Image (cartoon, rainbow, N blue to C red):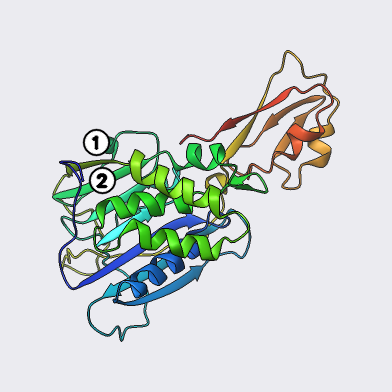
């Protein structure tokens, strides 16, 4: 391990996964629990779904313990959070409830120092899992499946589970495509950037009733999306108006009515575009290109 790599100490560890449908958060939780079990630990994996469709926010929880696990609840104060979607930290408090000195493994091309949080200090581990998934052709219905690269990055900061054991679990789970998944796991492990980062040390304001202010690490898992669905996408369509002829083919085929028209001119309502890219595929003039999503 490198100088900045972290080994989690203790007899019990709780991990919370933040992702969206199709990215593999639930599968990653199951694989981690299975690998821990093979290492002699008690383990547990619990999924938590919001809207039952690809792209909707999803949570998953894993407990790893040297003693029997009796709880069957969600995890509100995790030792580690694993964030599968690079847009989520800008829209969801993924650090909510995370213990001081805990670990955050984040799918991003940004440096660990970029992230802000209220804990005194955290170990931030970042890896561009989208790039790894695309290079290894781990893409399903246009969505990069980033769970395996992030699982590899997590193993970089959690030495209790040898990556070789996890590799065996991955091989058995993905029998038809195990080579690409194993390769992605090791690329996530080797390309992870790990830093200890200081936070604000101040709890975020919470609503309270009456005159008594309660300052505790309240955690509120996301159950779904209220209104805007911009965080559901991995890729975003962009219109080149110099090539657009105003044929309205994109407007006609958009399944979410996220393309608005004014006469023969169109624009994309990015608050509700889910990134299905149907518009790009039906444009006869290839006037709609595709780019990776960034926080808007």
Res. 61 visible in picture: yes
Q: Residue at x 43, y 74 (%)?
A: 46
Res 261 → quadrant: top right
Q: Residue at x 34, y 70 (%)?
A: 36
Determine whether 281 is above or below 184 in the image.
above
- Residue on which the image places disc 1: 113
Give the SS element for disc 1. helix
Q: Is residue 256 left or right of residue 51?
A: right
The disc at residue 14 is: none
Give the SS element for disc 2. strand
Q: Is residue 236 left or right of residue 86?
A: right
The disc at residue 124 is: 2
Question: How packed is label 1: few (under 14 Cα within 10 Å), some, or many (20 or more)?
Answer: some
Q: Position of residue 5 (x, y in %)?
A: 20, 46
Q: Is residue 223 left or right of residue 74?
A: right
The front one of 254 and 133 is 133
Res. 92 visible in picture: no
Label 1, label 2: how far apart the Cα atoms are: 8 Å
The front one of 49 and 150 is 150
The front one of 246 and 43 is 43
Q: Position of residue 188 (x, y in %)?
A: 39, 45
Res 94 → quadrant: bottom left
Q: Residue at x 49, y 36 (%)?
A: 131
Sequence-first tag of 1 and 2:
1
Q: Position of residue 285 (x, y in %)?
A: 81, 21
User: Disc 1, disc 2: CB below 8 Å?
Assistant: yes
Q: Residue at x 59, y 64 (%)?
A: 51
What residue occupies the far top of the structure in this picture? 242
């Amino acid at each position: 391990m490198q100088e900045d790599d972290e080994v989690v100490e203790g007899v019990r560890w709780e991990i919370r996964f933040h992702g969206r449908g199709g990215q593999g958060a639930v599968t990653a939780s199951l694989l981690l629990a299975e690998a821990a079990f093979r290492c002699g630990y008690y383990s547990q994996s619990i999924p938590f779904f919001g809207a039952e469709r690809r792209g909707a926010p999803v949570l998953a929880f894993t407990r790893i313990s040297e003693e029997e696990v009796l709880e069957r609840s969600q995890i509100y104060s995790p030792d580690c959070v694993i964030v599968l979607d690079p847009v989520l930290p800008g829209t969801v408090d993924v650090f909510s409830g995370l213990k001081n000195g805990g670990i955050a493994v984040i799918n991003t091309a940004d440096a660990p120092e970029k992230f802000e949080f209220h804990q005194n200090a955290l170990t931030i581990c970042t890896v561009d899992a989208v790039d790894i998934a695309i290079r290894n052709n781990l893409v399903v219905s246009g969505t990069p499946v980033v769970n395996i690269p992030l699982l590899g990055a997590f193993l970089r900061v959690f030495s209790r589970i040898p990556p070789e054991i996890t590799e065996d679990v991955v091989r058995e789970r993905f029998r038809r495509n195990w080579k690409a998944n194993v390769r992605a796991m090791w690329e996530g492990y080797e390309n992870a950037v790990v830093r200890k980062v200081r936070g604000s040390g101040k709890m975020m304001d919470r609503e309270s009733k009456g005159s008594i202010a309660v300052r505790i690490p309240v955690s509120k898992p996301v159950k779904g999306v209220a209104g805007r669905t911009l965080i559901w996408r991995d890729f975003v369509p962009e219109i080149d108006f110099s090539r657009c002829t105003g044929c309205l083919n994109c407007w006609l085929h958009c399944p979410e009515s996220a393309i608005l028209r004014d006469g023969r001119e169109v624009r994309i309502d990015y608050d509700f575009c889910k990134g299905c890219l149907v518009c790009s595929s039906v444009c006869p003039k290839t006037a709609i290109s595709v780019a990776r999503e960034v926080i808007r």
